[in-house]
Image: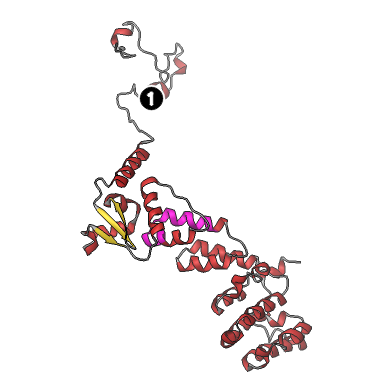
Amino acid sequence: MLMAPILSESNVPSNRLPYNSRQRLPSTDSDDSSTEDNAPMEGPGADEYTFTENSHSSMVLTGLNELRKSGQFCDVTLSVDGVKFPAHRNVLSSFSPYFKAMFLSKLAESKQSVVALKGIEVDMMSLLLDYAYTSSLVITRSNVQCLLSAANLLQVLPVIEAACLFLERHMDASNCLGIHCFAEAHACTDLQKKAKDFALQNFWEVCHQEEFLTLTAAKLVELTSSDELEVEKEETVFQAVARWFNHKPEARKPEFCKVLETVRLPLLSPYFLHDCVESLAVVRQSPECYRYVEEAKLYHLLPDRRAELSSDRTKPRNSADTIE
């Protein structure tokens, strides 16, 4: 037997109005009247009621994903290294500006039923398609770089941001330089800056890592030329540079002077300057390198003329004021 509606006319006394928790009973005190008494009713009892199903979007995505997996209503197939991924153009265009631009353009791909993609791995395409249809994916240490590269290609900003955050949270002395270079290559400027700052703030530990030895001269100079480089003494910088050079001496000899120029030799102790810097063969054999040594010697020998000898190499790094 069907039950009568809870608020039907037949089960509401004619001399009473149905009670609504949002309605206020009339006050006998005229001073208690306020604008709240005349506020419009809200909810299903109001003349106009806006209904929102909070789970609707997830239900639609679930339905679309089921359609994708069963191949129903799919109007495009993505081909990655020979692997086919049936999909819906409207879903692809909604989650990726790359696909939106492709399908709205007059290029051949906009009309093709099978679109071949290059520069993306099969596993990453699968992950990103799952994300497009479910709004979730799993980021791990083993897939984060490939995933970020793929998301960058397809311009999927939320995944790019999530991958960058993952890399930032897993950053340490052993990988910050690699993350810095990787972020730079993918135009992730915020992550690039944070990785560089980490390397500068933890230079002593970073310079003893394997990644440090693989830096290009340009990348090394980017670190050693910075006023923000945190070291207890300038000798640490020279030792790091010498270690980097000795890793591949012949290949790095032509660029060593550019690197040595960023070491603030005048701030080294005279004994260290003589025993460690001058004793390095590449320094003795290069007139250009040795010129920086002579400059440092004069700085120590002529203290009353240091104002005349002032340069970027005589300026203490910012950490000199904070490190005891």
Mark 1 nearby-residue class (10 Å; few <14, some 14–19, many ≥20): few
- Up the image or down, 100 lies above or below 174; here it is above
Q: Residue at x 41, y 53 (%)?
A: 127
User: Is 2 part of what is drawn in magenta?
Assistant: no
Specify the quadrant of the image occupied by residue 100. bottom left
Q: Residue at x 61, y 65 (%)?
A: 174
> How many numbered marks have been drawn onto this rendered protein structure?
1
The magenta region covers: 150-167
Q: Dot 1: what SS? A: loop
At which x and y percent is residue 102? 27, 60
The residue wearing badge 1 is 39
Report the predominant secondary structure element of the magenta stretch.
Answer: helix
At which x and y percent is residue 159? 43, 54
Q: Amino acid at mark 1?
A: Ala
- Up the image or down, 206 lies above or below 70; here it is below
At which x and y percent is residue 110? 23, 59
Q: Nearer the viewer, residue 289 or 254?
A: 254
Q: Nearer the viewer, residue 135 or 304?
A: 135
Task: Left or right? Give the position of 275 relative to 39.
Answer: right
- Image quadrant holding the C terminus, namely bottom right
User: Is 151 part of what is drawn in magenta?
Assistant: yes
Specify the quadrant of the image occupied by residue 62. top left
Q: Residue furthest right?
A: 271
Task: Left or right? Give the position of 279 relative to 286.
Answer: right
